[in-house]
């Protein structure tokens, strides 16, 4: 009996030891997100986390709350935890350079997620084709205005590649048409509340506004509230960027004219799949830009159906 009991105990210890060893051997993927107060990044992080689990990794999702100091601390925590790879969606590009360099020193690969980081050695940069998206928004808006009118542009976080690239694409189109005037270009930090406040001020400063391009849907939705309160929404074209659910609903209702839809569901998934390749020693491209699409009243129901609405 004693021999049987000893064998059982030994077997249990071996199972526990094996489980502990497997757990210790499991590689982890750090997913550092600029803010989880934005539906775009919530979906991106959720899909990245799910794909990481499917591929056998332990995902560690950290919210930086748009705070560069918290972001730096989050990256340091992942380094201390010996994360296998870090997907970094930075809240402030220049300050993130130091974080990338610390990862380089620790031998942890970094994938720049949605936003480029201008320093250190990143393994790759994956984003949407934001220059093309900006051009798409510009051409749509120009055509809707019959190539004549006063245009306002709401910028995202200054210094971020998404802000720069979307602005570059949009501005290049507006510059082509002499009848279009970019009367104001102001940052609202990709934030809905700030979009509302900035738009309220612009309405006061510019009595004649024909169209608004907001570099993300959150700002566009805030601008819509300001225009609606001023009884201008029916007169002003509003184009957003991202394709989040609230924006799709607004396009469907006719309040927002259009949005540029990113594949943010795919962005997180693809980033993790490239992380898997890197950790397996496979080669990956240095830059990947996913396609974007124009969503208007003509095709918005297809996008709503795709998200179960």
Image (tube, rainbow, N blue to C red):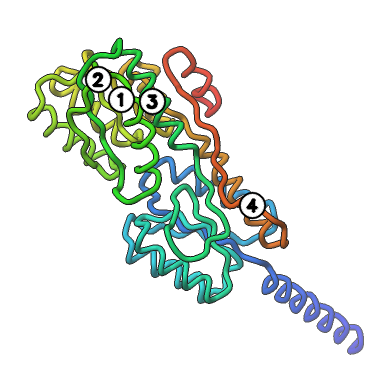
Gap between marks 1 and 4, in whole Å?
36 Å
Q: Residue at x 47, y 73 (%)?
A: 102
Which of disc 2 and disc 4 is earlier in sequence? Answer: 2
Task: Name the secondary structure under disc 4.
Answer: helix
For label 1, the crowd category at 10 Å Cα-Cα, with few meaning under 14, some 14 to 19 and many 20 or more, is many
Gap between marks 3 and 4, in whole Å?
29 Å
Vertical order, 26 against 298 (above or below): below
Q: Residue at x 17, y 21 (%)?
A: 209
What percent of the width, then of the height, locates residue 131? Answer: 43, 36
Gap between marks 3 and 2, in whole Å?
14 Å
Q: Quadrant of the N terminus?
A: bottom right
Residue located beneath label 1 in the image:
174
- Observer-side mark, 1 or 4, equals 1
Vertical order, 123 against 166 (above or below): below
Decide which of 148, 38 is in the foreground and name it: 148
Vertical order, 81 against 141 (above or below): below
Q: Please identify the quarter of the rendering in which residue 141 is found.
A: top left
Which of disc 3 and disc 1 is earlier in sequence? Answer: 3
Vertical order, 170 against 63 (above or below): above
Gap between marks 1 and 3, in whole Å?
10 Å
Proximity of marks 1 and 2: CB atoms separated by less than 8 Å = yes
Mark drawn on residue 137: 3
Residue located beneath label 2 in the image:
180
What percent of the width, then of the height, locates residue 116? Answer: 45, 52
Which of disc 4 and disc 1 is earlier in sequence? Answer: 1
What percent of the width, then of the height, locates residue 302? Answer: 53, 19
Does residue 198 appear left or right of residue 141 in this picture? left
Task: Name the secondary structure under disc 1.
Answer: helix
Residue located beneath label 4 in the image:
274
């Amino acid at each position: 009996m004693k021999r049987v009991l000893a064998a059982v105990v030994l077997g249990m210890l071996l199972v526990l030891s094996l489980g502990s060893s497997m757990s210790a051997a499991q590689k982890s993927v750090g997913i550092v997100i600029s803010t989880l107060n934005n539906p775009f990044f919530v979906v991106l992080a959720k899909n990245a986390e799910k794909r990481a689990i499917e591929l056998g990794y332990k995902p560690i999702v950290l919210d930086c709350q748009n705070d560069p100091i918290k972001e730096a601390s989050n990256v340091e925590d992942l380094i201390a935890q010996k994360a296998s790879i870090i997907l970094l969606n930075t809240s402030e590009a220049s300050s993130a350079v130091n974080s990338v360099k610390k990862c380089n020193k620790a031998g942890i690969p970094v994938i720049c997620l949605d936003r480029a980081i201008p320093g250190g050695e990143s393994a790759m940069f994956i984003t949407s084709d934001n220059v093309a998206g900006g051009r798409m928004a510009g051409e749509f808006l120009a055509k809707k205005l019959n190539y004549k009118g006063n245009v306002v542009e709401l910028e995202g976080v200054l210094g971020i590649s998404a802000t720069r690239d979307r602005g570059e694409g949009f501005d290049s189109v507006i510059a082509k048409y002499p009848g279009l005037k970019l009367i104001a270009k102001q940052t609202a930090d990709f934030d809905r509340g700030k979009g509302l406040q900035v738009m309220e001020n612009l309405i006061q400063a510019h009595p004649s506004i024909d169209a608004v391009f907001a570099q993300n849907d959150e700002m566009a939705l805030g601008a819509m509230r300001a225009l609606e309160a001023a009884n201008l929404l029916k007169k002003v074209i509003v184009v957003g960027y991202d394709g989040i659910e609230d924006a799709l609903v607004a396009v469907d209702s006719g309040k927002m004219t259009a949005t540029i839809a990113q594949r943010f569901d795919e962005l997180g998934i693809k980033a993790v799949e490239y992380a898997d390749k890197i950790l397996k020693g496979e080669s990956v491209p240095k830059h990947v830009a996913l396609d974007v699409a124009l969503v208007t009243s003509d095709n918005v129901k297809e996008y709503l159906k795709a998200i179960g609405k």
